[in-house]
Amino acid sequence: MSELTSLMTPACIIDMGKFQRNISCMQAVAKRDGLVLRPHVKTLKSLAAAERYAPANGPITVSTLAEAEYFAAAGYRDILYAVGLVPNKYDRVQALSERAEKFTVVLDSLAAVNALVSFADSLEHPLQVMLEIDVDDHRAGLLPMSDELLECAKALKATPQLHFRGIMTHAGGSYDCYTQQARDAMAEQECALIAKAAARLAANQIHCELVSAGSTPTALANTHHKGINELRAGVYATFDCVMAGLGVCDTDDIAMSVLTSVIGHQTDKNWVIVDAGWMALSRDQGTAAHAKNCGYGLVCDPQGRLLEGWFVSSTNQEHGIISHIDGKKPDDAIFAYGNMLRILPIHACATAAQFSAYQVIDEDGKVTETWSRITGW
């Protein structure tokens, strides 16, 4: 074990106690509602992290083929690649289907289905396929009552080298739900509409093995998730300022932070300059539309205690500028040259992507482990 002060900054920190509490909370929801939990590993993209919330004998969700290959090499066999498939990825997908028998791709249009059907004769092993359903007019997916949904499912069922597993959805619109009531309503809408799609397919003799839904806000909504059999979520393991801004968690639940050092000041502007710029924190400003705009991250002391009103107001590549929301003068005892601070991320996935490894700390703030991660697509 080592002290945080021994680390070179910037460094990405994972608070193990908070991390494990967040994981337990989501597992309890899935258990309560009788659902399979398929964690999304895209936030940390780390085997060492996934061992805590997504064991190799269970299902996972990934966002890149690089993740899929990384986890398949480690023994994961039920992997959902939850991004629409295009033909330039077919060769890698075919190789993955040979290594992981339940590697599953997602399609959301007849054009995508027809392209894969045309390629299917080249497959040596049957490929698992799901269709994405649009439940909130937010991003991708087929409408639950559309003729195109039926056409897609029938075409997949009729192709011997393709195995239709079912349907999935992601209620990305939940990221615009700023009250508990709105998140609860979105969660119920998400489940109701994908269940309607499954029922419509069943009425046409097309069985859905999986009816999969989820986003962190809807997964943690105050509702029982009726009409689905699988729950997906990812950022819940660390949380971030976006989730806190929505009310899904408290800032004290955020398990990720960026350790940074004070490298200078602009005293006439009441600025503190640190060595964590956008190359460490990312350019994400996901709280810009929230009641509380957290800029590029909220500032904590070295122990992770929030310094009320202090936030990263702007960033350059390797420089971050810390200001107070009310323009207060920095306290020299806290913000002295060389002092360390911790920054809570706006979007944990984006911040995590800036680092090749995470430093894991225990309840005493000691560094106990280093977790590596995968990068690329």
Image (tube, rainbow, N blue to C red):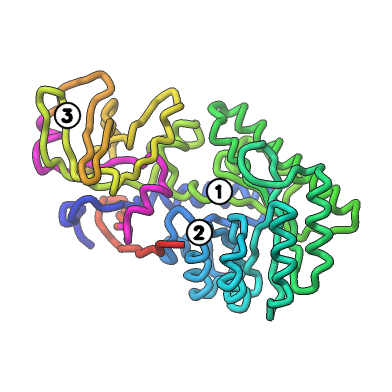
Q: Which mark is residue 56?
A: none
The picture places residue 54, in percent across and down from the top left corner, at: 53, 62
Check if residue 66 falls in the magenta segment: no
The picture places residue 24, in percent across and down from the top left corner, at: 51, 51
Above or below for 212 versus 157: above
**Residue type pointed to by label 3:** Trp
Reading the image, the residue beneath label 3 is 271
Q: The residue tagged with tag 2: helix, strand or loop? A: helix
**Residue type pointed to by label 1:** Met
Mark 2 is surrounded, within 10 Å at the Cα level, by few (under 14), some (14 to 19) or many (20 or more) other residues, namely many
The answer to whether residue 153 of the structure is visible from this angle is yes
Q: Which picture quadrant has residue 289? A: top left
Circle nearer the N terminus (2, 1): 1
Residue at horizontal 24 percent and vertical 25 percent from the top: 324
Mark 3 is surrounded, within 10 Å at the Cα level, by few (under 14), some (14 to 19) or many (20 or more) other residues, namely many
**Residue type pointed to by label 2:** Tyr
Nearest the camera: 41 or 205?
Answer: 205
Check if residue 352 falls in the magenta segment: yes
Residue at horizontal 51 percent and vertical 60 percent from the top: 64
Residue at horizontal 34 percent and vertical 45 percent from the top: 282
Nearest the camera: 99 or 228?
Answer: 99
Tell me how far mark 2 sits from mark 1, CA to CA: 10 Å
**What segment is highlighted magenta in the picture?**
332-358
Q: How many numbered discs?
A: 3
Circle nearer the N terminus (1, 3): 1
Question: In the picture provided, is 152 more to the left or to the right than 64?
Answer: right
Q: Which picture quadrant has residue 125? A: bottom right
Reading the image, the residue beneath label 1 is 26
Nearest the camera: 98 or 369?
Answer: 98
Reading the image, the residue beneath label 2 is 53
Above or below for 369 versus 312: below
